[in-house]
Amino acid sequence: MRGAGADVAVIGGGIVGLALARAALARQPGLKLVVLEKEAALAAHQTGHNSGVVHTGVYYRPGSLKAKLCVTGARRMIAYCRDRGLPLAIPGKVIVARTPKELAGLVEIERRGRQNGVEGLRRLDRAALAELEPHVAGIAALHVPAAAIVDYAAVARSFAAEIAAAGGEVRTGVTVRGFAADAQDVVVETTAGELRARRVANCAGLHADRIAALAAGRPPADVRILPFRGEYYVLAPRAAGLIRGLVYPVPDARFPFLGVHFTPRVSGAVEAGPNAVLAWRREGYRRFDASWAETAAMLGYTGFWAMAARYWRQGLAEQWRSFSRAAFVRALQGLLPELRPDEALPGGAGVRAQLVQRDGALMDDFCVRRAGPFLHVLNVPSPAATASLAIGDALAEQLAA
């Protein structure tokens, strides 16, 4: 690859990087564009390890970029999968209040959803909930009929095929090591040699802050990515038959995770989870995966200790559920009382790249920063996959500006 040149280099072959590349080529036919992915296959991390849910936008603060992109992006994602024959199902979702204390949260979610333009929302009392989900326990619920499930790894591969058809390149097994610059170009130093590019889009997901640090010569002063692992169980066939659609609790508004829930997959399986535990390496999919260097860097960040002070109670509860299957099952039985302990079978896990500010706050909206020829996509939490088509368009516009 030495001496090769491009108009745009996109770092990261997850769904966001591929969506940006696809949109950039649509905006500027003939653009010389290269996607660089360090793994041997695309969608190897967050894209390939998520739940497959097409989120509707009911949770997000009205007016936020996250809300706007999610609602439009969800409709586009469903249409995209239909048009291309990709795996898709629309089972709908219920968000369940289990106690009177959760009713206020349910009202707020409905308010946000209606303000965000989510269609078909319907409040359910106990009897109406039982008609939709007869085995789910709750005193009230919000029905979100547009909630869908897809295979985001398949979507990513479809994006890559469109990039190639439009004249772009997708190169796997290429790791970015650093950057240099001359009067006109950025020199991207990789394990496959140098690539010269006019502009660089950093969509490196779990490693986006590291790429930003390589570009600037120092880490971002005010934010850092910390990895959170979400662990799943898979329901045995009898228990899976008790669930008809997506079943979620009313989330704790103080914590930017949705709580353990039930998710049918396009494969026909039903997953239960996830929890949200701090991972001790950025690609730590197993409980004891750890990197001393990454752990030391995490512990050396002021924001880590500020976050720990804010969320230590929730963090301990999540860690306990990680190590105690009985505790995890009890949390699930709060929604599905008929679930037997032996019907929750160990499943997979994903790792979420969570941007944490120096004051310990978990950044909940998208965070994109420009620095000369660089566009750094530092935080694209859920619903990034749902909104990827809309996010790709927005990022391509910023890149071209």
Image (cartoon, helix red, strand yellow):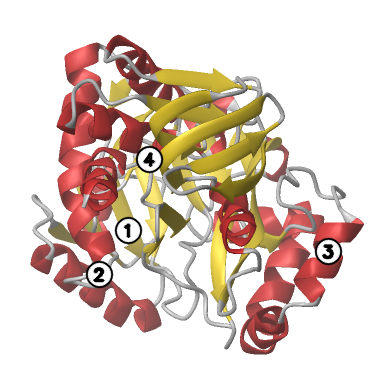
The correct choice, above or below, for 238 with respect to 162 in the image is below
Q: Quadrant of residue 314?
A: bottom right
Dot 2: element: helix
Residue 188 place in picture, x, y as percent: 58, 39
Residue 386 located left or right of residue 17: left
Residue 325 place in picture, x, y as percent: 76, 52
Dot 3: element: helix
Marks 1 & 2, CB-CB < 8 Å contact: yes
Marks 3 & 4, CB-CB < 8 Å contact: no
Q: Residue at x 58, y 71 (%)?
A: 220
Of all residues, the one furthest to the right in this rendering is 292
Q: Residue 213's mark?
A: none
Separation of disc 2 and disc 4 at Cα? 18 Å
The correct choice, above or below, for 119 with respect to 307 in the image is above
Give the labeled residue for mark 3.
295
Q: Residue at x 32, y 67 (%)?
A: 139
Give the labeled residue for mark 1.
95
Marked residue nearer the N-terminal end (4 or 1): 4
Q: Residue at x 29, y 64 (%)?
A: 59
Query: What's the residue type where badge 2 is placed?
Result: Ile
Give the labeled residue for mark 2.
109
Mark 3 or 2, closer to the camera: 3
Marks 3 & 2, CB-CB < 8 Å contact: no
The answer to whether one can see residue 69 in this image is: yes
Query: What's the residue type where badge 4 is placed?
Result: Val
Separation of disc 3 and disc 2 at Cα? 36 Å
